[in-house]
Each structure stands twice: as structure tokens, then as C-alpha cells.
Amino acid sequence: MLFDSHAHLDAPEFDGDREELFEKLVTEGDISYVVNPGVNLETSKHAIELAQKYPWLYAAVGFYPQETGDLDEDMLFLLEGLAKKEKVVAIGEIGLDYYWETVPHDVQQYWFRRQIQLAVRLGMPIAIHDREAHGDVMRILREEKAFENTKVLMHCYSGSAELARQYLKLGCYFSIAGPVTYKNVKKAPEVIAAIPLDHMCIETDSPYLTPTPFRGKRNDPSLIRYTAEKIAELKGVSYEEVAEATCETAKRFYGIE
Ligand code: NI
């Protein structure tokens, strides 16, 4: 039983074979649940449509940092409407991205704050995208009292073990993706050791971040077992234990019974 806590199954990469893939996931795989986050209004709507069609699929809604360049109040209002729909379990993915210098940092930060405030007001958990913006993400989450008022998940966690320990003290959750299987990710063993399974989720971030040995191909939730296997190896526990514990953690985080 595996829970893919973050997969963009609405992405155009799946348009050609989505139905067959979904059929295969539930009949042949051990996938129990998937959460599909949006990155703007259109993808959030698509994620909700899919989630309402498939019982094992849930949606999150949000504006990804690179989608905040021309955001306005009306669009935020529309997002709030989407957040209240059936099968929507979180606000995400939202955050800061200083790798792609397409949207000014102050603009990203403003809309990140506004979406945290929305999540807190609606009592919904938050899925965070943090790329090369560790200091500002932590500062803004603390200033907005996100940890006190809701649950926070660091999607595709890429920080250090030390930062993970700081986040854990605040009650934060983490989601580990395919890069944990890459040879060049040197800090992976230390990071995996620092995060207990009751605060760890796993994800594919499909169609991106395909784990070894399928790196370079399209990712899909069936490949999440390679990430779970690597975590089991690094933690010195069984694959079944990682699968079951991360599934329970994700259900608790997203509030899925
Ligand atoms: Ni993503």
C-alpha cells in the first residue's frame, strides 16, 4: 500500500494514455492514494475534475511561485472557491523558487503569504515548493504562524539534515521524491536518517523526477516503489514498513480516512 503524496497527473504528458495508466495503477500496482496538486487555476481545476472521477485520487489547489507574476485578487478569490470543492485536501503547491529568475522575489513572497493565510483561514494543510529559497520559506512560514495554525509539508524536500531537524521541531512534514535514488545526491542518507517515518511522506512529482533506474523517462506513480526501496535501505528497515508508515503519515497529513 503506497501513497504518492504529490503527482501532476493532470499534466499534458499523460493526455495520450491517462485512462490506461490509471487502470493499471489500481489493478496491477500497490498504489492506494495519490494527491494531484495544481500550479495555477487551470491545472487546479483539472486536478479536481480527475479527483472527483477516481476514488483514490485527491486534489490540492494553488499558485506555484512561477505562476504568481500576473496574479490578482480576482484569481485568488477563484482559488478560494476551488479550495472548497469536494476532494480538495490541501493548498499547494505554493512557495518560493529562486532557481528560475522569472518572477521577482517580492512578488513571489507576497502571494506565498496570501495563500498561507488562505490555508489557515480554511483550516487546510499546505504543500510547499522551496527551490533555493530555504531561508525565506522558513522565515515566512514562521511569520505567518503556519506551524501553529495548520500542517505544513515540504514537498520534494531538498534541504539539509540540519534544516530538517529545525522544521521537525516546528511539527513539519516532509515528502521525499525520486532524487533520493540519484547517486549525486550526497546528503540523502543524512536527511533520511534525520526524518522519522511518522513525519515522512513519499512522492513521485510525476511526470518529473523519475527515480533510478528509469531516470530520463516519464515518471508515474507506479515508480514510487523505487523511492520507497531506497528509503528502506537507507533507514535499515523493510520496504513494507516504509510503504505502510509513509501511507499512514500522508493520510494523517491530508486528513484522509
Ligand atoms: Ni510538483
Image (spheres, rainbow, N blue to C red):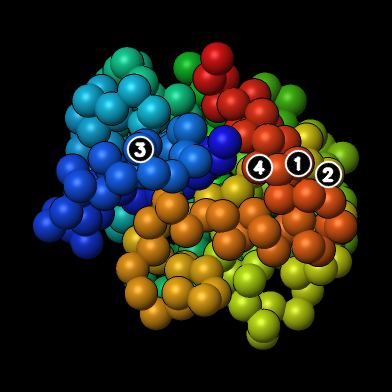
State the mark number for residue 27.
3
Q: Is residue 42 left or right of residue 151?
A: left
Distance in Å between CA atoms under marks 4 and 1 = 5 Å
Distance in Å between CA atoms under marks 2 and 1 = 12 Å
- The amino acid at mark 1 is Glu
Where is residue 90? Give x, y as percent. 47, 30
Q: Residue at x 78, y 35 (%)?
A: 198
Say which residue label 1 marks: 241
Give above or below for 256 relative to 232: above
Distance in Å between CA atoms under marks 3 and 1 = 22 Å
Instruction: Kindly indicate whether the residue at mark 2 contacts the one at mark 4 (C-beta within 8 angstroms).
Output: no
Q: Residue at x 76, y 56 (%)?
A: 232
Where is residue 164? Give x, y as percent. 80, 54
Give above or below for 110 relative to 86: below
State the mark number for residue 196.
2
Q: Is residue 39 left or right of residue 109?
A: left
Figure quadrant of the C terminus: top right
Q: Compare residues 48 and 220 and report the one nearer the observer.
A: 220
- The amino acid at mark 2 is Pro
- Quick check: can you spot residue 25? yes
Say what secondary structure mark 4 lies in. helix
- The amino acid at mark 4 is Ala
Instruction: Kindly indicate whether the residue at mark 1 contacts the one at mark 4 (C-beta within 8 angstroms).
Output: yes
Earlier-in-chain disc, 4 versus 3:
3
Distance in Å between CA atoms under marks 2 and 3 = 31 Å
State the mark number for residue 243.
4
